[in-house]
Amino acid sequence: MNVKIVNLNKWYGEVHALKNINVIIQTGKFTSLLGPSGCGKTTLLKILAGLETPDQGDIYFDDQCVFSRDRNINVLPQKRQIGMVFQEFALWPHMNVFENIAFPLKAKKMHVEIERKVESILETVRLEGMSKRYPDQLSGGQQQRVAFARAVVANPKIVLFDEPLSALDAVLRDEMRFEISNMVKQMNLTGIYVTHDQIEAMSMSDQIIVMNKGNILQVGTPEDIYDRPVSKLVMDFVGKSNWFECGTKAIRPERLALYPTGPYKKVSGVVQSIAYLGDKYEMIVQIEKMGNWMSYHNKRCQLGDRIDLYFKHSDVIRFAD
């Protein structure tokens, strides 16, 4: 199901939380709303779910208008064909896995073949044989799968995710990133995912919407956002960046090399710190007139070493002054 948002605005008193939001989210795509805390991404998600009411604008799910202030349209949340996965899972502790997943079916009075539908979705999320367990008998990853199963068991067209991995440890987050995005695509759902974690957004998404202070800064593929940022704000927020003295040019740390390879430019500096990351070393190098630059290498240098860093002219990203 396509989602089209037109001229959407939301105020909280004098705070303009969303400013003229215009964007299209395509059917079957996994889209992340990426931005710092307070940028408006969760507000936008709640508006799509029908849990918040915008002050201006229109929202379409395919050809159906689900909200229009001018035409006095506001489709109820339960009629929008959406599922939602919350940050804290929100599983009922007194219900077992089967009862938690079946809850939205019963709430919609869909009493036919409940057992078949629940068992089918349990197989999809790889929780066969766990229908009688209670949430406190499950791992964090298993609870996350139950939350996802509950969100999709009633066959929604859109699934909304509100930072669902923030409660998990780092290893489990890595595992669940792949599982969530893969399940959304396998089921041909439209996934909309709120996160402030750029690694999550880059690794999971077909499309990223970068937001800041209620504005959309850029919409594009992960490659577009990282390699072709449209502004300094996007450059700084997504990935690491090293800025030249002029303030209108920057280069990513991984584009710097210790040895020249073909046509190159060079900067020199003194190693200030070194961190071993397992597959590489991360070095902070103080460059004259440019401040501290970050660089990644497979060779350990020593603190205080003076080194040369080489880069290609084509790897420099430029912005208007």
Image (cartoon, rainbow, N blue to C red):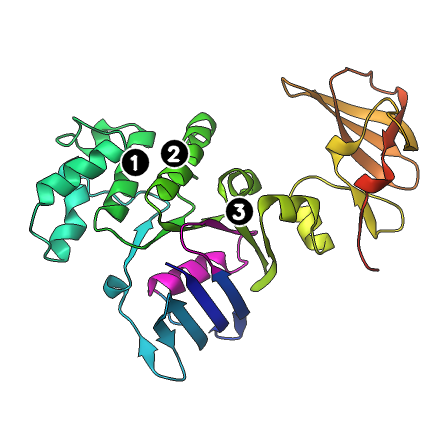
Judging by the rendered image, the residue that carries numbered circle 1 is 145
Q: Which residues are magenta?
A: 25-51
Residue 208 image offset from top left, x and y in percent: 54, 50
Q: Is residue 161 above or below residue 115?
A: below
Viewer-nearest of labels 3 and 1? 1
Q: Which mark is residue 301?
A: none
Viewer-nearest of labels 2 and 1? 2
Cβ–Cβ under 8 Å for marks 2 and 3: no
Q: Earlier in the sequence, mark 2 or mark 1?
A: 1
Q: Is residue 255 above or below residue 250?
A: above
Cβ–Cβ under 8 Å for marks 3 and 1: no
User: The residue under label 3 is which amino acid type?
Assistant: His
Q: Does any portion of residue 96 appear in the rendered image?
A: no
Q: Earlier in the sequence, mark 3 or mark 1?
A: 1
Mark 2 neighbour density, 10 Å: few (under 14) some (14–19) many (20 or more)? some
Which corner quadrant holds the C terminus?
bottom right
Please tell me whether mark 2 sits on a helix, a strand or a loop: helix
Camera-nearest residue between 274 and 198:
198
Judging by the rendered image, the residue that carries numbered circle 2 is 179
Judging by the rendered image, the residue that carries numbered circle 3 is 196
**Residue at position x 51%, y 46% in the image:** 206
The residue at the far left in this view is 112
C-alpha distance separating marks 3 and 1: 21 Å
Mark 3 neighbour density, 10 Å: few (under 14) some (14–19) many (20 or more)? many
- Left or right of 84? Residue 116 is left
